[in-house]
Amino acid sequence: MQHRHLLSNEIDLLLDGEAGFGVAPLRAHVDECADCRARLEEARVVADALERLPHLAPRPDFADRVLTRVQIVEPWHVAAVDTARRFVPESRPLRALVFAGASVASVAVSASAVWIAFSANLTLGSATVVTGRVRSALVYGAQQGFESAFGAGAADALRANGSVAVAAAGIGLLAAVGAAALGFRALASASRRRGS
Ligand SMILES: [Zn+2]
């Protein structure tokens, strides 16, 4: 027989009527130990009571109804990208144009976020914990936006050196403006082709 009292998972095994290799010594212990027999009996009473409770199934739309009440907090840069995606048109030249416009906007937003963050740093000097948090949230968001626009390498540069980031943002802005111009040209030639 087993020379210690049963653990709760061993009592569960006996309750479930398991007949595995390890169960025989447990059963032997219960036969000789009044304490464990009492615990097993108690567990059986609880399990039977639970089994007698009405079995309920949630309505099929339960999960949907719960989720409509859950407020999901999205980081602002994710929300911005999702919103932008909704405005992406089907035609390719228009698409290029919208993407170029969106990159101009995202660079502008990132740059202003970085600017706000750095000027907050300058004016406040020893910033409080709250403004520190706001600033790091802004910088983090700007980095995420930057990273999605220009890749991880550019974001590393942003982390490493503020002025490099400003320069990169400027170059990015120029590139986006150039892409916008190309998009306009493609759009114009596409509509000319359609017109002729
Ligand atoms: Zn025992």
Image (cartoon, rainbow, N blue to C red):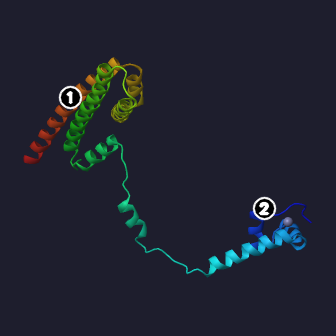
Q: Residue at x 43, y 73 (%)?
A: 60
State the image coordinates of residue 172 (x, y, percent, origin top left): 28, 27
In this rendering, does residue 17 appear at all? no
Alpha-carbon neighbours of circle 2 within 10 Å: few (<14), some, or many (≥20)? Answer: few
Residue shown at the point (33%, 34%) measured from the top left: 149
Ligand 1 image-quadrant field:
bottom right
Q: Quadrant of residue 107?
A: top left
Q: State the SS at label 1.
A: helix
Figure check: 12 above or below 181: below
Mark 1 residue type = Gly
What residue occupies the far right of the structure in this picture?
A: 1
Residue named by callout 2? 7
Instruction: Return the residue nearer the eye: 162 or 148.
Output: 162
The residue lying toward the viewer, choosing from 29 and 95, is 29
The residue positioned 26% from the left and 23% from the top of the image is 170
Q: How would you rate the neighbour count of disc 1 (Cα within 10 Å): few for under 14, some for 14-19, many for 20 or more?
A: few
Query: Where does the image place residue 41, in percent across and percent down from the top left?
Result: 77, 75
Q: Decide if residue 46 is on the left or right side of residue 132.
A: right
**Labels 2 and 1 touching (C-beta < 8 A):** no
- Residue 84, given in percent of the width and then of the height, sits at 26, 45
Q: Which residue is mark 1?
A: 178
